Amino acid sequence: MVSDVPVSLALELRQASHRMQRLLDRFSQYAPPLAQHLSVISFEQISTLISELQQSERVLRLRLGCSDTVLDQEIAEYRNQVERLRDLLPVLSEMLRGEQVRLKQQSERMRAASDWIRSSNQTVQTQFHE
């Protein structure tokens, strides 16, 4: 009797690989420079990618003891997607560091503008009371 376990694991892994491939394709189309396109890569997409990795880990753990050609092919495809992710992670990391610098600069500009407004208000109030 042939078990349905390898078939269902292969299907789960195929679906996970496909979803990961779509996300990685989307990330890759903006590299480099990713920093200019940060708004198209959302926290939710990165979170989804991490969830896919966690789900696939479960599938791979269940695979222990199962031997099936289709499942082996899906594992190979999944491995390709994980390797793409490995290659893309340094770019994503650089992008996030750039975004961190940009946000810090923007925060400093906002603080300077706030200080200027506060100073201007004090000047106006001083002149008004004279």
Image (tube, rainbow, N blue to C red):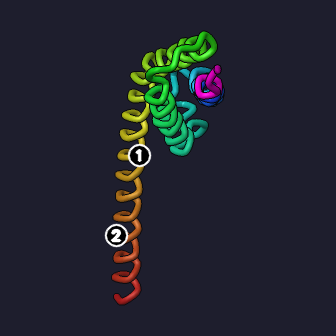
Along the line of sight, which residue is nearer the eye, 117 or 45? 45
Task: Estimate how packed mark 2 is, as few (under 14), some (14 to 19) or many (20 or more) residues with alpha carbons within 10 Å.
Answer: few
Q: Which image quarter is the C terminus in?
A: bottom left
Q: Residue visible at 37% across and 34% down?
A: 97
Left or right: 123, with 48 as reference point? left
| Residue 48 % position (x, y) | 54, 40
Separation (CA) of disc 2 from disc 1: 24 Å
What element does badge 1 sit on? helix
In which quadrant of the rendered view does residue 38 lie? Answer: top right
Residue at x-position 37% and y-position 63%: 116
Residue at image mark 2: 119
Q: Position of residue 43 (x, y in %)?
A: 51, 44
In the image, is residue 1 above or below residue 127?
Answer: above
Q: Which residue is mark 1?
A: 103
Residue 5 vs 41, above or below: the answer is above
Residue 54 pos. (x, y %)? 46, 36
Residue that appears at 56% across and 39% down: 45
Disc 2 secondary structure class: helix
Q: Quadrant of the N terminus?
A: top right
Residue 124: image location, x then y, percent = 40, 78
Mark 2 or 1, closer to the camera: 1
Say whether residue 6 is magenta. Answer: yes
Q: Which stretch appears magenta?
A: 1-7
- Is residue 99 among what the camera can see? yes
> Does 11 lie within the magenta span?
no
Tell me the crowding category of disc 1: few under 14, some 14 to 19, or many 20 or more residues within 10 angstroms, Cα based.
few
